[in-house]
């Protein structure tokens, strides 16, 4: 998978042990930096590890697919696909929790993770991805640049990690994968 020099992106296998310490530290760094990724500040190590243990269970159950980016110092990025969807949506996945450590930003890692996630979705037989992000954020601009289609904005959808409401924009993107079975 293409990544910035000295950074490796890999899909973690269902039976593989997640690098919990590195993933927890990454999530704490992102929240400390103000990223609205579902957690409030301060995020404790126990809370972050608990989240990643639940993700690990989802990966083991085949409900999630997880990419991790690492450099020589450890985990610097991640993104996941939520594969488990309702019975009438087997062709779709939610792209979730794109995270890049502050020490690894501005090197193309977020874009590399997104492209790898799109390829992984296709490998998983998914043809449609959806995601949401803070309106006007760097991620919003990244998704637009990568060809994601803006669906709409919901005001006051979530809280910033240190409080205060923020708007959220929803996006979708079609990817090449195995076509879903259609009904009559």
Image (cartoon, rainbow, N blue to C red):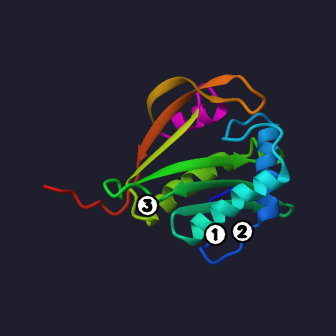
Element carrying mark 3: helix
Looking at the rendering, the stretch of residues picked out in magenta corresponds to: 134-147
Element carrying mark 2: loop
Q: Nearer the viewer, mark 3 or mark 1?
A: 1
Q: Residue at x 72, y 36 (%)?
A: 35
Q: CA distance from mark 3 to mark 1?
A: 16 Å
Q: Residue at x 67, y 29 (%)?
A: 159
In the rendered structure, the answer to whether residue 132 lies left or right of residue 34 reads left
What is the crowding at mark 2: few (fewer than 14 residues within 10 Å), some, or many (at least 20)?
some
In the rendered structure, the answer to whether residue 89 lies left or right of residue 120 reads left
Vertical position of residue 44 compared to residue 61: above or below: above
Residue 150 in the image: state x and y as whole percent: 45, 31
Q: Nearer the viewer, mark 3 or mark 2?
A: 2
Q: Which residue is mark 1?
A: 12
Residue 1 in the image: state x and y as whole percent: 61, 63
Q: CA distance from mark 2 to mark 1?
A: 7 Å
Q: Which residue is mark 2?
A: 18
Vertical position of residue 106 compared to residue 18: above or below: above
Q: Is residue 105 magenta?
A: no
Q: Are marks 2 and 1 in contact (CB under 8 Å)?
A: yes
Q: Which residue is mark 3?
A: 122
Residue 75 in the image: state x and y as whole percent: 78, 59
Which quarter of the picture shows residue 52? bottom right
């Amino acid at each position: 998978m293409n990544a910035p020099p000295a950074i490796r992106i890999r899909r973690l296998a269902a039976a593989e042990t997640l690098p919990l310490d590195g993933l927890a530290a990454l999530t704490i760094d992102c929240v400390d930096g103000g990223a609205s990724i579902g957690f409030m500040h301060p995020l404790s190590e126990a809370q972050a590890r608990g989240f990643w243990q639940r993700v690990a269970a989802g990966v083991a159950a085949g409900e999630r697919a997880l990419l991790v980016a690492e450099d020589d110092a450890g985990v610097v990025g991640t993104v996941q696909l939520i594969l488990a969807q309702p019975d009438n949506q087997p062709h779709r996945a939610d792209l979730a929790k794109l995270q890049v450590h502050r020490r690894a930003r501005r090197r193309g890692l977020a874009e590399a993770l997104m492209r790898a996630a799109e390829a992984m979705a296709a490998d998983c037989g998914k043809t449609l991805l959806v995601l949401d992000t803070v309106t006007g954020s760097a991620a919003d601009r990244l998704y637009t640049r990568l060809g994601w289609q803006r669906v709409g904005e919901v005001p006051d959808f979530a809280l910033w990690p240190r409080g205060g409401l923020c708007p959220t924009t929803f996006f979708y993107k079609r990817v090449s994968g195995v076509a879903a079975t259609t009904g009559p």
